[in-house]
Image: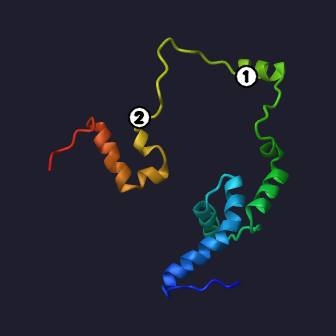
Amino acid sequence: MVQKIPYRNIPQLLLRAREELLCHFRPIINHFGLTEPQWRIIRALSDVLGKRLPFDSLAQLRAKLYGEFPHLARVDRIATGSADDVAKAAKLGGRLGKGAFTSPVTDFYLTNPIARASAVMAECSALARNGFRQAAE
C-alpha cells in the first residue's frame, strides 16, 4: 500500500528517500568497516582522478584484494614464524642504548598531512606548545 505523504517539502522527501534506500546497504558497508562517507569519497576520488575503480561494491573490492594479497583474508590469525627468520633479524645488528625509550612524535597534532593542512589542528598544536594557556577574551 502506498503511504500518503502529508507534506511537500522536497529536501525532506529526498532525505527520507535516501534513508529508505540506504537502509538496505548500510549493513553491508558497516560489515566491512567503512562508513558510507568513506566509500563515497573513495568512489568520487577514483572518478576525479580519471582512474575509475574496477569494482562497484565493497564485496568486489574485498574479492580483488584477497586475490592479490591472500594474507589480508586471514583476519585474526597469526602467521607462524621460523627460527631462520629470527636468526636473519639478529644478524642485522645494531645496538640498544641505555637511555629511556621516547616517542618519536614531537607534535601529536601535526602527525599526518591532513592534520598539517588543517587550521584547527595548527591552532591545537600552538595551544599544546604553550601548555594550553590561552588569552582571556
Residue at the spot of label 1: 89
Q: Secondary structure at mark 2?
A: loop
Would you call the spot at circle 1 few (<14 residues within 10 Å), some (14-19), or many (20 or more)? few
Q: Is residue 35 above or below residue 123?
A: below
Q: Nearer the viewer, residue 75 or 70?
A: 75
Residue density around tag 2, few if under 14, some if 14–19, many if 20 or more, within 10 Å: few
Q: Foreground mark, 2 or 1? A: 2
| Frontmost residue, 122 versus 35 | 35
Residue at 30% x, 37% y is: 129
Lower sequence index among marks 2 and 1: 1
- In the picture, the disc for residue 106 is 2
Q: Are marks 2 and 1 in contact (CB under 8 Å)?
A: no
Q: Quadrant of residue 54?
A: bottom right
As shown in the figure, which amino acid type bears the numbered disc 1?
A: Ala
Indicate the secondary structure of the residue bearing disc 1.
helix
- Where's residue 41, x and y in %? 59, 65
Residue 133's image quarter? top left
Which residue is depicted at the point 50% across and 86% down?
Answer: 7
Q: For this view, does 105 lie left or right of residue 30?
A: left
Q: In the picture provided, is 108 more to the left or to the right than 51?
A: left
Quadrant of image for the N terminus:
bottom right
Q: Nearer the viewer, residue 113 or 124?
A: 124
Q: Is residue 123 above or below residue 26?
A: above
Residue at 54% across / 81% down in the picture? Answer: 13
Q: Position of residue 105 (x, y in %)?
A: 45, 34
Question: Would you say residue 41 is visible in this rendering?
Answer: yes
Relative to 74, 40 lies left or right:
left
Residue 64 % position (x, y): 81, 57
Q: How is the image coloured?
A: rainbow
Residue 50 in sight:
no
The number of numbered discs placed on residues in the rendered structure image is: 2
